[in-house]
Image (spheres, rainbow, N blue to C red):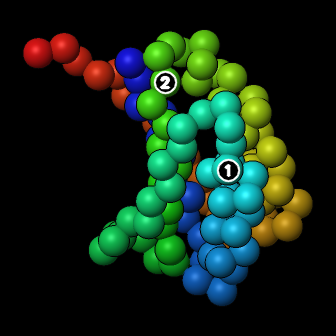
Amino acid sequence: MFLYNVSVIAEETIHQEIVSWIQDNIVQSQKFQVHFLEMLQSPHEGMTYCIQVVLPSEEHIADFQQIHLTPLQQFISEEYKDKVFLFDSTMKYLKK
C-alpha cells in the first residue's frame, strides 16, 4: 500500500478559491478515497493543504495523477501562476 500526498501552498489572498476547486474536483471523486487536510502551524507563508490518497500500487498513483493532479496543475498555471506551489510525495507502508 502507498500513501500519495500532494502538498499545496497558496497565498492567503487566493487560498479559498484553491480549496473550493480541490473540493469540487478532487475530494468529490468517486474513484478514489481522498483525504483533504489543512496543515496547522505550517513553516511556510500562506496556507498549506494536503491531499492524501491511500492506493494499492504505483499504477494507481499514476492513474490519480493523470485524473486529478494534471488538471490541478493546469488550473493553477492558468489562474494563479506564482501564487500557488505544489509538491508531491509517495510513501510506502512498511509491514511490522
Tell me which residue sits at (41%, 23%) in the image.
2
Residue 80 x/y as whole percent: 78, 68
Q: Is residue 32 visible?
A: yes
Residue pointed to by mark 1 = 28
Instruction: Give the amino acid type for the residue marked by disc 2 in the picture.
Output: Leu
Q: Nearer the viewer, residue 5 or 56?
A: 56
For numbered disc 2, what is the local secondary structure?
Answer: strand
Looking at the rendered image, the disc whose residue lies closer to the viewer, 2 or 1, is 1
For numbered disc 1, what is the local secondary structure?
Answer: loop
Residue 82 x/y as whole percent: 72, 67
Residue pointed to by mark 2 = 55
Tell me which residue sits at (50%, 62%) in the image.
49
Residue 6 x/y as whole percent: 53, 46
Using a 10 Å C-alpha cutoff, classify the residue at mark 2 as few (fewer than 14 neighbours), some (14 to 19) or many (20 or more): some
Using a 10 Å C-alpha cutoff, classify the residue at mark 1 as few (fewer than 14 neighbours), some (14 to 19) or many (20 or more): few
Instruction: Give the amino acid type for the residue marked by disc 1 in the picture.
Output: Gln
Tell me which residue sits at (60%, 19%) in the image.
60
Q: Is residue 82 visible?
A: no
Left or right: where 62 falls relative to 70: left
Q: Nearer the viewer, residue 13 or 33?
A: 33
Q: Name which quarter of the figure residue 95 lies in.
A: top left
Report, in whole angstroms, how far the alpha carbon at label 2 lies from the one at label 1. Answer: 17 Å
In the figure, 96 relative to 13: above or below?
A: above
In the figure, 40 relative to 73: above or below?
A: below
Quarter containing the C terminus: top left
Of marks 2 and 1, which one's residue comes earlier in the chain?
1
Residue placed furthest toward the bottom: 13
Tell me which residue sits at (67%, 58%) in the image.
22
Q: Nearer the viewer, residue 25 or 66?
A: 25
Residue placed furthest toward the right: 78
